[in-house]
């Protein structure tokens, strides 16, 4: 995928796009078709915890509104990342998959879609849709032969975060540019040294107990010296580059940073909120918005210390952040009526006046400028935290999560970090597991 996503996202987030007019009739299911054929239809939606799409009370209201307008009942099951894939894979084996699923292209397109389990949604997209949706977001949801296995809804940039009060106490805040939210690799290691001298050994963790939150460790290692995770064509994994080996070597040798095989990203976030870690590599706008402290105030630790989100440190000054894209897919259960009803659901949530509610429920940024005449460029104008976070959007990098063999690559990555943390030779271990990932990509 060509890397134009930063420019497109920056344009969207600075509200420079304008809404388009209402679309002419097309061949997609209308959002409010309450015809008799759909009155008794029941659909199942399995949703990963994409913002408040993991909150039953919030989703129940969306489903009630949808049913009131369309007559279609949607029964929702809430998945966790730790076992959601296993549940869906089990359902596939049992031929009992849900009608709809909410997640990202790495699952819907590169995994289940590539294996033939998903419905092609390309007939839902007319030329106006293609103008309104950011091209790179749509490309991530589309196969090489033009099949669309995910209808995109929202996206964000993943980042890291620092305990700003702790940084100030250690004199390390001098190494942060809080206007651009960037810092250099040199200043990152200086900050870790200052924090370790002040607070001791648990400054940050290269967590590697599993794949949870691995976008953080990938972005950290790739950014430090300009390495990449895949080639631009998404046909091969490239983390055995010297730049990545150098980054891993320096992280392993830095006091205060521990390779920890006992935790994953969620554990790291919990320790960061508690003030145990002074940095977190698994961060995004959802965490920044989370009022996870006694005062119920976002952007604070449980002890009331200020959290500052940051781009990952780079030697070049040009961070490349991991992007997250989430949207809806339909499993092909062979029931034409249910597939039609599922498309009605997607149209309602992702391309109608109701899209504002669906986007705000996700607590991410819309992938499109407008939906059936409704302007989406100012959807977060009432939220200063969302507005501040937009400074990261121009730093979005390549969405490489659609590379073949992605599932194996994620396992190979965290296993590699575990082995290195246990003392294995860095260069040969990186090559071994990079080769393992590439074997799965063939």
Image (tube, grey):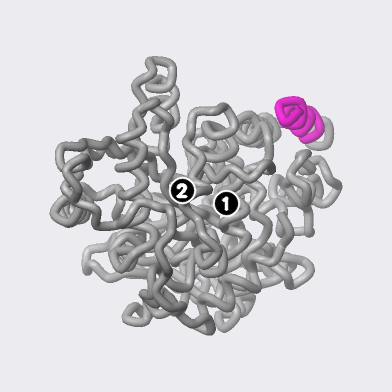
Magenta residue span: 429-442
Q: Is the stretch drawn in magenta largely helix, strand or loop? A: helix
Instruction: Residue 157: give x, y in percent of width and height.
Output: 54, 62
Residue annotated with mark 1: 216
Residue annotated with mark 2: 268
* 115 drawn magenta: no
Quadrant location of the N terminus in the rendered image: bottom right
Furthest residue toward right: 242
On screen, 197 above or below 207?
Answer: below
> In front here: 50 or 263?
50
Residue 198 visible in the displayed image: no
On screen, 2 above or below 257?
Answer: below
In the picture provided, is 385 more to the left or to the right than 159?
Answer: left
Q: Quadrant of residue 442?
A: top right
Marks 1,2: beta carbons within 8 A: yes
Crowding at mark 1 (Cα within 10 Å: few <14, some 14-19, many 20+)? many
Q: Secondary structure at mark 2?
A: helix
Q: Quadrant of residue 394?
A: bottom right
Instruction: Residue 105: give x, y in percent of width and height.
Output: 54, 45
Q: Which mark is residue 89?
A: none
């Amino acid at each position: 995928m060509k890397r134009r996503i930063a420019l497109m996202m920056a344009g969207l987030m600075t509200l420079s796009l304008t809404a388009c007019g209402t679309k002419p009739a097309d061949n997609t299911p209308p959002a409010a078709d309450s015809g008799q054929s759909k009155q008794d239809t029941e659909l199942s939606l399995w949703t990963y915890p994409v913002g408040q799409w993991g909150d039953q009370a919030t989703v129940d209201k969306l489903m009630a509104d949808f049913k009131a307008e369309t007559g279609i009942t949607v029964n929702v099951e809430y998945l966790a990342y730790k076992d959601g894939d296993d549940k869906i894979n089990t359902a596939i084996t049992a031929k009992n998959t849900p009608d709809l699923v909410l997640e990202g292209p790495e699952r819907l397109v590169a995994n289940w879609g590539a294996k033939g389990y998903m419905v092609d949604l390309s007939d839902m997209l007319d030329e106006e849709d293609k103008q309104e949706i950011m091209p790179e977001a749509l490309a991530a949801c589309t196969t090489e032969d033009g099949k669309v296995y995910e209808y995109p809804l929202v996206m964000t940039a993943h980042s890291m975060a620092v305990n700003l009060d702790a940084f100030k106490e250690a004199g390390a805040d001098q190494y942060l540019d809080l206007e651009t939210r960037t810092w250099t690799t040199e200043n990152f290691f200086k900050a870790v040294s200052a924090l370790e001298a002040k607070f001791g050994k648990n400054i940050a963790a290269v967590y590697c107990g599993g794949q949870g939150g691995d976008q953080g460790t990938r972005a950290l290692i790739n950014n430090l010296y300009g390495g990449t995770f895949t080639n631009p064509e998404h046909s091969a994994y490239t983390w055995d580059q010297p730049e990545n080996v150098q980054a891993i070597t320096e992280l392993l040798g830095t006091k205060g940073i521990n390779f920890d095989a006992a935790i994953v990203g969620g554990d790291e976030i919990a320790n960061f909120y508690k003030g145990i870690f002074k940095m977190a590599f698994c961060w995004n706008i959802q965490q920044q918005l989370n009022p996870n402290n006694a005062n119920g105030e976002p952007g604070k630790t449980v002890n009331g210390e200020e959290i500052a989100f940051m781009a990952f440190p780079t030697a070049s000054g040009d961070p490349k952040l991991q992007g997250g894209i989430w949207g809806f897919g339909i499993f092909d259960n062979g029931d034409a009526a249910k597939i039609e009803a599922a498309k009605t659901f997607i149209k309602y949530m992702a391309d109608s006046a109701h899209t504002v509610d669906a986007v705000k429920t996700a607590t991410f940024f819309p992938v499109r400028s407008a939906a059936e005449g409704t302007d989406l460029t100012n959807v977060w104008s009432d939220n200063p935290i969302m507005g501040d976070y937009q400074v990261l959007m121009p730093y979005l990098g390549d969405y490489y999560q659609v590379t073949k063999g992605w599932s194996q690559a994620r396992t190979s990555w965290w296993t590699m970090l575990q082995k290195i943390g246990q003392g294995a030779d860095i260069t040969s271990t990186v090559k071994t597991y990079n080769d393992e990932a590439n074997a799965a990509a063939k």
